[in-house]
Image: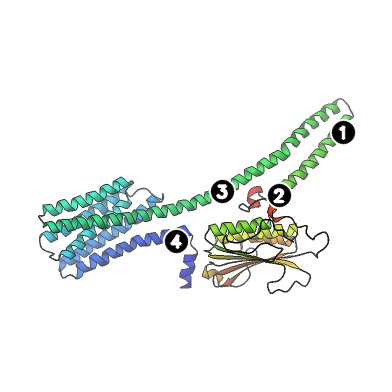
């Protein structure tokens, strides 16, 4: 059972919706066999019952095959199954005609049994055929044609008026309802896949937009300086050719501008490589809440600020200041960003908790002094992935993102631990030693509201480092 639930939790939400939709269609095929085929076989009609059962099985199999291929066609994965649609239409028409003839010739005298046989052949076939039609007008014509054909054949066979009315009303109501259910389910599945594709496209566009913005910033910084360097170097060449001593001064100025440009480029790149803790925490809350994940942020006063809250009801105060040094803020901000990405990409989380403190989780400070501890814990991890509680090391399924975080934290003598805690939960713990408090560090932590961005796109994706 654990393997089955692990397999299910490992699927993305669009895949889960598609599996549910497909098996709902297949369930209608089994319902046709149970409601029409089995009673025909056990009604005491002798060899006729066996032939009717085989005819029902044939139509149910064709309908299930058409539903699967038509669903793939509507999702853009294959061409329209025209021939199979025609085959199902012919088989359904033949089944309905057989049911009417058997009733007209009194081979089947039970009116309820005959009505169920007629409606089953006509309705299940009609709904499956509608899946292979392009427009709603074609579907309406298919319903009207089925109802009109049923009425015409019933009148031709000189059946009583009450039977004619019952057959027409039954086929019209059941056919319309089942066609709507089939087509709406297929449309809903396509909408889910389209939304997933739109979200993926939005992510790629955000990366492209950030790259363009970085290019513009780099151009603004380097464009003027490079133009000045070109002009001054050309002037220096001309002065040198004339033996003028001013050439040395011009080249010294070129050297100065080049060094200034190098410093400005480093400042630009540094701005993209630094993450702001307050912004990342608020961004994580917003992104996870939008994805339907219950996000709770817990932090000691002076670290996060404000009251922790669930969803969007509480959170970090916009004017709070963190007592953490800037480099610690940046490192922990990257941890929050990577952890949020992993929660969205892996598993099917329903709850995520972020805790920030200045001590071990048990409340004991580090032997060498204080340390900042950030813990991100979420559920929804596949059960088979939580079988081992061993920490995830570099090179295992922790991925390159966790390896990059370990490198960032190692630069501050920090550590990162990722492990499955059992019961479908995953915990990421980052620890960074804090310097002893001094006059130069009290109250000088950068404002958390002045971060460089919202944490929606990683710096590695923007600058390629």
Q: Position of residue 95 (x, y in %)?
A: 20, 57
Labels 1 and 4: the sequence-earlier one: 4
- Residue marked by disc 3: 204
SS for tag 4? helix
Labels 2 and 1: the sequence-earlier one: 1
The image's mark for residue 406 is none
The image's mark for residue 16 is 4
- Residue marked by disc 1: 249
Q: Residues within 10 Å of mark 4 (few under 14, many from 20)?
A: few
Q: CA distance from mark 3 to mark 4?
A: 24 Å
The image's mark for residue 271 is 2
Is label 3 in contact with label 4 (beta carbons under 8 Å)? no
Labels 4 and 2: the sequence-earlier one: 4
Q: CA distance from mark 1 to mark 3?
A: 48 Å
SS for tag 1? helix
Labels 3 and 2: the sequence-earlier one: 3
Is residue 84 visible from the viewing direction of this image?
no
Q: Please, is residue 282 above or below residue 369 in the view?
A: above
Labels 1 and 3: the sequence-earlier one: 3
């Amino acid at each position: 059972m654990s393997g089955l639930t692990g397999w299910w939790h490992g699927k993305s939400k669009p895949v889960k919706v598609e599996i549910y939709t497909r098996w709902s269609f297949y369930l209608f095929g089994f319902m046709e066999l149970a409601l029409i085929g089995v009673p025909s076989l056990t009604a005491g009609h002798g060899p006729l019952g066996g032939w009717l059962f085989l005819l029902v099985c044939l139509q149910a199999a064709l309908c299930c095959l058409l539903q699967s291929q038509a669903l793939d066609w509507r999702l853009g994965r294959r061409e329209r199954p025209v021939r199979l649609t025609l085959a199902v239409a012919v088989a359904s028409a033949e089944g309905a005609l057989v049911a009417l003839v058997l009733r007209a010739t009194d081979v089947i005298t039970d009116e309820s049994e005959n009505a169920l046989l007629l409606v089953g052949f006509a309705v299940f076939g009609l709904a499956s055929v509608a899946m292979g039609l392009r427009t709603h007008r074609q579907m309406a014509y298919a319903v009207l044609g089925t109802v009109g054909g049923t009425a015409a054949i019933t009148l031709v066979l000189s059946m009583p008026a009450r039977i004619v009315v019952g057959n027409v009303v039954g086929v019209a109501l059941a056919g319309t309802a089942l066609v709507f259910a089939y087509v709406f389910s297929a449309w809903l599945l396509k909408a889910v896949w389209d939304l997933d594709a739109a979200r993926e496209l939005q992510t790629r566009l955000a990366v492209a937009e950030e790259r363009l913005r970085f290019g513009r910033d780099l151009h603004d910084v380097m464009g003027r300086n490079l133009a000045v360097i070109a002009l001054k170097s050309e002037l220096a060449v001309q002065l040198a050719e004339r033996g003028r001593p001013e050439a040395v001064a011009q080249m010294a100025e070129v050297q100065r501008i080049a060094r200034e440009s190098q410093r400005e480029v480093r400042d630009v790149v540094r701005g993209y490589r630094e993450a702001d803790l307050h912004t990342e925490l608020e961004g994580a809350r917003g992104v996870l809440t939008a994805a339907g994940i219950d996000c709770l942020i817990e932090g000691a006063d002076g670290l996060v600020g404000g009251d922790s809250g669930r969803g969007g009801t509480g959170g970090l105060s916009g004017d709070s200041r963190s007592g953490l040094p800037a480099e610690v803020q940046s490192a922990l901000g990257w941890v929050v960003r990577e952890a949020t990405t992993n929660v969205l990409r892996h598993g099917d989380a329903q709850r995520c908790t972020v805790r920030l403190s200045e001590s071990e989780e048990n409340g004991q400070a580090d032997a060498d002094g204080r340390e900042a501890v950030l813990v991100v814990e979420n559920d929804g991890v596949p059960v088979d992935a939580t079988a081992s509680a061993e920490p995830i090391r570099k090179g295992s399924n922790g991925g390159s993102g966790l390896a990059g975080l370990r490198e960032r934290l190692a630069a501050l003598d920090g550590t990162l631990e990722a492990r499955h805690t059992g019961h479908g939960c995953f915990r990421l713990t980052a620890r960074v030693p804090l310097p002893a408090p001094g006059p130069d560090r009290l109250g000088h932590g950068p404002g958390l509201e002045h971060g460089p961005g919202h944490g929606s796109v990683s710096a590695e994706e923007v600058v390629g480092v």
